[in-house]
């Protein structure tokens, strides 16, 4: 990776840290931090560890799914290597707006390790499409079955979130399956850009067309390997289940039992689809605010702040730090 990439990563990281500091200052500025930490210390550590491990299983299953897709494409890697790429991708997705930085970096390191670039791109695109599909369907079903979750204005965030995710999925599907439609859309876009006197348009158009070629390769794979795609959807469904189960174990760590697994699962499914498309690194600020809104009836005023802090640290910030360590070790080993 060049100096420009390292500088951009540093700036993204600093913005990420500033967002965290600002968010938690605004949320906890009038609260007793010692009391919050005391509540967290009193939690059941076995349940807490179970919640933390759910996220590891989530990441492991993503790595396993990408490995199996690569094998179906004729390129083999170990689970360990695939997990390394997944951790690296998770870190860069977390610190870049709309999680846009993860996949390009994963593909870069895959190709550096002699994985075919086209096959790496196709496997990650298929995984992304299936993940989008599963999370949209799950979030929608959970919202319909538990419509009372969408109250106090939260319904607007949910509508925006699921709409943006659905549009993103549609764009990926059109780019994958409809070459004619995407070519028309690109030509219209570049007519507009020329009118705005944007520079280097020919180079930009070439890059977009190269990316679209990878989408069309995905379409060919899907048409010829429907069984593999179906298996990928099943693996992603299991992956998402573990992702949504993590907050349930955090809830249990507080010694609470009024709400069952399905209710907590639904809460997380609706929360995730509402905030995942927000163009902020890790959806920081929005995720915390949405958590406080949707979980306030679950934890009550006394535990809500501690629950939000512990849940976000155990299921997100902890793994950002772990993945950062993987990124650093990988960079040292490769001397990037």
Image (cartoon, helix red, strand yellow):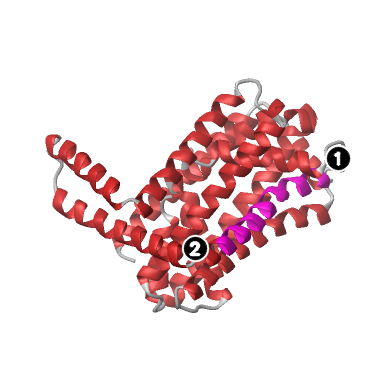
Q: Mark 2 Cα within 10 Å, few/some/many (few <14, many 20+)?
A: many
Which one is nearer the viewer's eye here, 173 or 256? 173
Task: Give how far across and how far down residue 42 sits, in percent.
Answer: 84, 46
Q: Which residues are magenta?
A: 230-253
> Position of 78 compared to 308: left or right?
left
**What is the spatial separation of the Cα atoms under label 1 and label 2, in whole angstroms?**
35 Å
Quadrant of the image for the N terminus?
bottom left
> Residue at the spot x=68%, y=52% of the render?
241
Question: Residue 33: in sight, yes or no?
Answer: no
> Residue at the spot x=45%, y=50% of the render?
13
Task: Assign a secondary structure to mark 2.
Answer: helix
Which one is nearer the viewer's eye here, 173 or 44? 173
Which residue is labeled 1 in the image? 256
> Position of 246 compared to 257: left or right?
left
As for residue 38 lying within the magenta part, the answer is no
Q: Mark 1 Cα within 10 Å, few/some/many (few <14, many 20+)?
A: few
Task: Give how far across and how far down residue 207 sits, in percent.
Answer: 24, 56
**Quarter assignment of residue 218:** bottom left
Which residue is labeled 2 in the image? 88
Q: Earlier in the sequence, mark 1 or mark 2?
A: 2
Task: Give how far across and how far down residue 221 sits, in percent.
Answer: 42, 66
Question: Residue 247: in sight, yes or no?
Answer: yes
Check the image and report above or below for 270 versus 124.
above
Quadrant of the image for the C terminus?
bottom left
**Quarter assignment of residue 255:** top right
Dot label at residue 212: none
């Amino acid at each position: 990776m060049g100096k420009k990439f390292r500088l951009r990563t540093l700036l993204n990281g600093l913005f990420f840290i500033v967002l965290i500091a600002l968010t938690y200052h605004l949320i906890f500025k009038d609260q007793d931090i010692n009391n919050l930490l005391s509540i967290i210390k009193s939690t059941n550590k076995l349940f807490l560890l179970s919640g933390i491990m759910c996220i590891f299983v989530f990441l492991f299953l993503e790595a396993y799914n990408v490995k199996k897709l690569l094998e179906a494409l004729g390129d083999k890697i170990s689970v360990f290597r695939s997990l390394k790429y997944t951790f690296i991708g998770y870190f860069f997705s977390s610190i870049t707006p709309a999680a846009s930085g993860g996949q390009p970096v994963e593909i870069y390191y895959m190709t550096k390790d002699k994985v075919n670039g086209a096959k790496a791109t196709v496997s990650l695109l298929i995984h992304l499409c299936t993940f989008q599909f599963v999370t949209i369907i799950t979030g929608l079903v959970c919202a319909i079955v538990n419509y009372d979750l969408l109250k106090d204005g939260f319904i607007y965030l949910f509508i925006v979130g699921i709409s943006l995710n659905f549009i993103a999925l549609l764009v990926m599907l059109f780019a994958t399956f409809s070459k004619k439609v995407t070519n028309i859309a690109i030509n219209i876009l570049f007519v507009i850009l020329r009118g705005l006197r944007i520079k280097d348009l020919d180079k930009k158009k070439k890059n977009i067309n190269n990316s679209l070629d990878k989408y069309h390769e995905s379409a060919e794979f899907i048409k010829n390997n429907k069984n593999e795609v179906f298996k990928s959807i099943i693996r992603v469904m299991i992956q998402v289940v573990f992702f949504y189960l993590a907050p349930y174990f955090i809830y249990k760590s507080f010694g609470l039992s009024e709400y069952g697994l399905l209710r907590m699962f639904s809460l997380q499914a609706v929360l995730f689809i509402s905030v995942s498309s927000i163009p902020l690194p890790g959806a920081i600020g929005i995720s915390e605010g949405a958590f406080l809104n949707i979980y306030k009836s679950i934890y009550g005023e006394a535990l809500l702040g501690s629950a939000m802090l512990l849940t976000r640290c155990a299921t997100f910030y902890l793994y950002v730090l772990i993945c950062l360590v993987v990124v650093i070790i990988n960079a040292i080993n490769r001397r990037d």
